[in-house]
Image: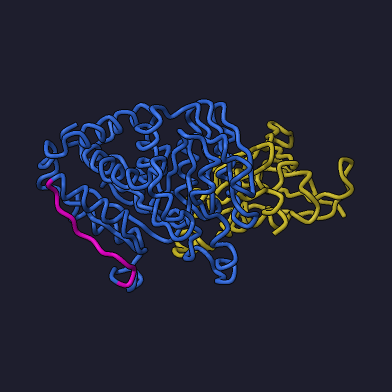
Amino acid sequence: MLKGRSLIEPLDFSVEELDALFGLANEIAEAPEQYADACAGKLLATLFYEPSTRTRFSFEAAMLRLGGKVIGFSGEANSSAAKGESIADTIRTVACYADVAVIRHPKEGSALVAAKRTDMPVINGGDGGHQHPTQTLTDLLTIRREKGRLNGLRIGLCGDLKFGRTVHSLIKALSRYEDMEFCLISPEELVAPEYVVRYIRQGRDCGYTEARHMKEVMGRLDILYMTRVQRERFFNEEDYLRLKDTYILDAKKMKDAPQDMIVMHPLPRVNEIAPEVDEDPRAKYFEQAKNGMYVRMALIMSLLGVGV
Amino acid sequence: MEVNSIEKGIVIDHIRAGFGLRVLDYLNIDKANGMVALIMNASSKKNDRKDIIKIEGVTDIDITALGLLDHGATVNVIENGHIIEKIKLELPERVVNIIKCKNPRCVTSLEPALPQVFHLVDAAKEEYCCEYCEETRRVTDISSE
């Protein structure tokens, strides 16, 4: 039962609760019109202290498609944070008006701080370079739909594994499933933090290898999860410029990949996937984006306890 | 130099030499009514030198933090001049406002009024992680600050 709960990090929901959520998302994807009034009279608050296109639009589209309404701000300058208000005070105030809130904030742990100060369900829409659990719901749903399972998979995670919150959340979530192998492909400067590697070590029959070059692992992957090197996470512009084009997936590299491997990316991409790869049937990142809306519709409905 | 034994209270023995003042600070007993003695650089059989703290009159101070600061120390509870309990120190599962998060991206760097909460994640490696950002810190690094 997810009614009244918050989603702050990927393990907040049990595997069984996730299965139910993905089941609902699949039903919504099959017949979205049947859910057009599911959240009529309900209000979603979107508190985006940090710029976002996909996550914010996806949440807003999800709520509007469920017949609910949306209030919110985008950019810290447009919020009371610019006047020095704390996250705790902002969320308490918002809880007076809205039924559910999604928060994106550049500081790590901000969504947890918000969730602790209110009984209203709070959804972490990304907290700095830490976690992004609704992207993980999107990723898990996509893997389930494309590969038919969430265990016994070899997944390559490539790019910025240090600050890539989508990668951190996905590894944490997948470590709960059996017989997973993670190939961590990154430059030395952007390796996964220690706490992320610990998720794998503590997982069920999970293992990992580290690689500096894509070709080392490309031929034996079920999934290749590409990420962008994020300019906004660097304190030093020179470091960003040096590392931003370390990995570029193109048609030539795709020739080394198995025919049933899928390519995923949380988007937005910059240079890390050449546009020519979009035509490859193994490229699934735009399906992933669509799945994101359906799974967020299922999430909002579940947290509000409507129609489930 | 001689410090008398106590009738009732707590003796924290085998504190790593030089750590006595920090332990006193963390125990927050500077407002205690009874007598408090800090002995620094006492000779030790186990190690070369050690610090000792004797607190008279109280037996219920919070020693949670002590396990984190120096789990090699021993705590003896004294009643009627005799040791009635020896407390084995362990690394605490959760500590509040003892370890400070060093991650500049952590929410605690933005909102300093938030309590600094850390959880034990690996007892063998003596590692704690921040409740908010999961930044890992080792006890050895914390102790040497």
Residue at position x 53%, y 30% in the image: A180
What residue sits 72% from the left and 56% below the top? Answer: B144
Give the vertical position of A129 relative to A6 (above or below).
below
Q: Residue at x 29, y 33 (%)?
A: A21
Magenta residue check for A70: yes
Q: Is residue B35 above or below residue B112?
A: above
**Chain letter, blue in picture:** A
- Percent across and percent down for residue A157 are 52, 44
Question: Residue at 59% of width from left, 71% of height from top?
Answer: A238
Q: Is residue A69 left or right of residue B95?
A: left
Horizontal and vertical percent position of residue B4: 80, 48
Q: Is the N terminus of chain B in the top left, top right, bottom left or bottom right quadrant?
A: bottom right
Residue B33 visible in image = no
Residue A188 position, x and y percent, is: 65, 54
Whether A276 is among the magenta residues is no
Q: Colour of chain B?
A: yellow
Viewer-proximal residue, A122 or A163?
Answer: A163
Residue B110 % position (x, y) = 45, 65
Residue in front for this viewpoint, A129 or A216: A216
Which segment did they paint magenta?
A67-77
Task: Tell me, yes or no, if residue B95 can be seen here.
Answer: yes
Locate residue A195 relative to residue B20 in the image: left or right. left
